[in-house]
Amino acid sequence: MMNKPVTKMKSMQESAGRAFVFSLRSVQFGVVDLAAATDFFSGPWGLEVLARTPGSVYLRAAGGGDCAIGLHQRDKTEVLRADFRAASRAALEERHAALRAAGVQCSEVEPLSEPGGGYGLTFRDPDGRSLLLVAEDAQEATGSPRRDAPLKLSHLVLNSPQPQVLEDFYAGALGFRVVDRTRKMFFLNCNSDHHTIAVVPSDVTTLHHLAFELGGFDAVMRGIGRMRDAGYSIGWGVGRHGPGNNIFAYFSGYEGLPLEYTAEVQQIDETYAPGSVEKWVPTPGRNDQWGAAGPPSDELKKAEHRVMFSAEPFAAPAAS
C-alpha cells in the first residue's frame, strides 16, 4: 500500500514540532521454529522472556519495562510489525486524525490485547511495513541484572527502493528529523539517541538490521563471547561508526536475522547540526573510525537483504 500525499506529510511535520514518537518500543518477528528462536534470544543474545501466549513469546531487555521483541510461529522468517512508543492515548487520537487527513489508511485507536496492554494505532509506511504506535502500556520496573545483557532496542535500519518517499513519510507522519547522511544511507532521530531509524537505498524492501544497545565496550565484548560460544561468528566488527559514534558488532543470528550489538551511541539534542555526505567521507581503506573492523562478511551482506516485511495483517494472540 502506498501512503500519500507527501505534501500533506510535510505539512504535518511543520505543525508537529519535535517528534511525535519518542522511542522504538519493539519489533515483532515471524519465526519458523519458535522454541529454538526463543532459546537463541533468551540464551546467547541475552534477552529475558517476559510473557508467553499460544504461538508467541515476548522478550525484554535488561533495562526493564519494554517488550524488546515478539516471536511468533510462522511458515517463514519475516518482520511482522515495528512498534513505536507515543506519549498518551490522547496523543494517539491526535495522530489518528492527522494521518487520516493526510490520506493514510489506519486503524482506530484501540485497546491492545497483547502483553502489556495499553492503546494502539496501526498503519503502514509507503513500503508496506506494518507499524504500531502504542501508549499507556504497562511496563515492568526491572529487567535482568546482568551487566552484559542488552539494555534496550537501539535502532531499526530499513532497506528501501524509494528512500526519499520514506524520508518524507517518517518526517511527516511521525516527526523524525534527518540528522546525518552518508553515501550509503541516512539517519532519523526522535530522541536523545543519534538515530532510531536509518534508511539504506536498495532494490528490495527488507530489514537491513536491528540493533540492541549494551552498557559499554566490555558488555559488547562479553556478548560477542557468548555468541561465539554458541557458534555465531561476528559478521562485521568490532568497530566504531562515524555517524552516531557508536561501537558495533554485527551477526547473522538465528534463522539469519541481521542483528547488531552496539554501545556508546552519541547523545544529541535540537542543536545538533545535521551532517552532509561530504562530512562523512570515509578514510580510504577503512570501514570504521578505528580501522579495525574490516569489511562485512558475505553471510552478513546476505542477511542484511534477506528478511522481508510481511504483507499480511498482524494480529497477535491475546495475553492470558
Image (cartoon, rainbow, N blue to C red):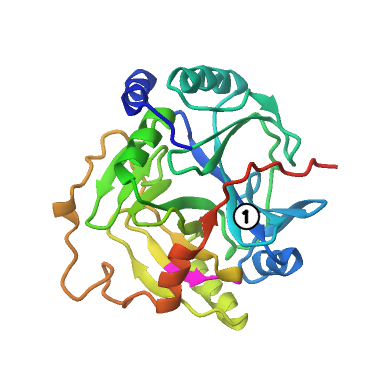
Q: Residues within 10 Å of mark 1 (few under 14, many from 20)?
A: many
Quadrant that contains the C terminus = top right
The reply to whether the magenta stretch includes residue 105 is: no
Judged left or right of residue 138, residue 101 is left
Point out the residue furthest to the left here: 278
Point out the residue furthest to the right here: 320
Judged left or right of residue 223, residue 281 is left
Residue 10: % across, % down? 32, 25
Q: Which residues are magenta?
A: 249-254
Measured along the vertical axis of the image, is residue 61 above or below residue 17? below
The residue closer to the viewer here, 44 or 111, is 111
Magenta segment's dominant SS is strand
The residue closer to the viewer here, 166 or 154, is 166
Please, what secondary structure does the residue beneath circle 1 have?
A: strand
Measured along the vertical axis of the image, is residue 45 above or below residue 120? below
Residue at x 32% of width, y 76% of height:
295
The residue closer to the viewer here, 315 or 49, is 315
Residue at x 40% of width, y 28% of height:
4
In the figure, residue 72 lies in which quadrant?
Answer: bottom right
Residue at x 56% of width, y 23% of height:
92
Q: Amino acid at mark 1?
A: Phe
Residue 140: % across, % down? 71, 42
Judged left or right of residue 248, residue 320 is right
In the figure, residue 47 lies in which quadrant?
Answer: bottom right
The reply to whether the magenta stretch includes residue 252 is: yes
Residue located beneath label 1 in the image: 29
